[in-house]
Image (cartoon, rainbow, N blue to C red):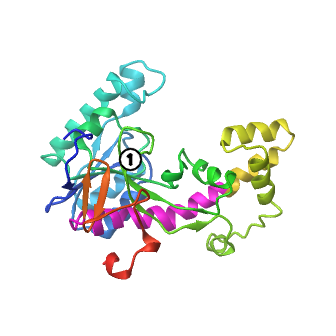
Amino acid sequence: MHYNDAMKQKIYDPTMNIACWVSGKGTNYREIYNHDPAKKYFVCTNRPGCEGIKIVPENKNPPTEFNSDNFFRKMLGLKEIPRKGVERNFYDIALCTLMEQNIGREPDLICLAGYDLWVSDWMVDKYYPRILNVHPGDITKGYIGPQWVPSALAILVNDREVRSTVFVVDKGNDTGPVLVQSKPVPIFQEAWQKDLNEIIDFESRHYESIRKFGLEKKLGNVKAFIKFAENEGKPKLAEDLKSISEKLQDQLKISGDWIIYPFAVHELIAKGRVEIDGRTIYIDGKKMPPHGLRIDEINKEMLL
């Protein structure tokens, strides 16, 4: 089904085989797998030998591996892996063909679990709405980007909390329909610092200075903030922004990503509770708001 076609359908199949795409440690895949090891899992990777595929022997299904660096840089002679285009489509066609041969049919669900390539338009057209991703940031607020950037963006616009988001992948940059969001993690909270065994004095590390500097100069863009801070002779502000944001991202992965991704897969989709009509998501027949289902706003019965 083309991803623009509007037809209400369940993202679900009773046999429920799940393809998890990994490029690194595979921690999101690990959490999805541990939540229900009885399901059929198949792992795909563009990084043969990565740590994520070591989880595979536990469920006795060999991984599907296709080296993206070899394909784009050695075979095609490209310096950079393209985001879109014919070459990008060819790679996904090859990898998905290998995946389906390994599974024996199309996967019921594809979970991008620390996968470091953008999926192609061809892949979205083929599998939408069966591709999920998790992002350590609130994509409805535009807190997107790699590594520590989402939390940095929240700090710079004076937000006081961050959330993780599970969403259906479309052709945009983290713009797909939102399924679930995590509980909020306060940007300043001594409790989570203790959980990381590291208490940071945000005042001494210029947290308020970072916030005020960004607001006064209207520097909501991380690159602009870093450049302006350096030009103003205040490189420490940029260093502290990164340090604070990295710790927020680490906490958000634990209390956000690793909670809501398995929940979305096993407690919602696998139980037939999720339907989608174009870009509108329904859970238990109820139309979801743009931010999806928020874990902290639901009752205990809905968690079961």
Residue 31 point in image, percent of width and height: 38, 64
Q: Quadrant of the N terminus?
A: top left
Q: Quadrant of the C terminus?
A: bottom left
**Residue 115 vertical placement versus 55 (above, below):** above
Residue 80 point in image, percent of width and height: 48, 25
Kindly identify which residue carries mark 1: 176
Residue lying at the far bottom of the rendered structure: 300
Q: Nearer the viewer, residue 14 or 184?
A: 184
Residue lying at 57% horizontally and 50% vertically, measured from the top left: 150
Residue 180 point in image, percent of width and height: 40, 62
Residue lying at 43% horizontally and 45% vertically, measured from the top left: 175
Instruction: Locate residue 132 relative to residue 175 in the image: left or right.
Output: left
Q: Nearer the viewer, residue 94 or 49?
A: 94
Residue lying at the far right of the rendered structure: 233
Residue lying at 60% horizontally and 47% vertically, measured from the top left: 149
- The residue segment tinted magenta is 245-273
Tell me, yes or no, whether the highlighted magenta stretch contains residue 264: yes
Residue 231 point in image, percent of width and height: 83, 35
Tell me, yes or no, whether the highlighted magenta stretch contains residue 222: no
Tell me the SS state at disc 1. Answer: loop
**Quadrant of the image occupied by residue 30:** bottom left
Instruction: Locate residue 87 relative to residue 297 in the image: left or right.
Output: left
Amino acid type at mark 1: Gly
Instruction: Locate residue 96 relative to residue 231 in the image: left or right.
Output: left
Prevailing secondary structure class for the magenta stretch in the rendered image: helix
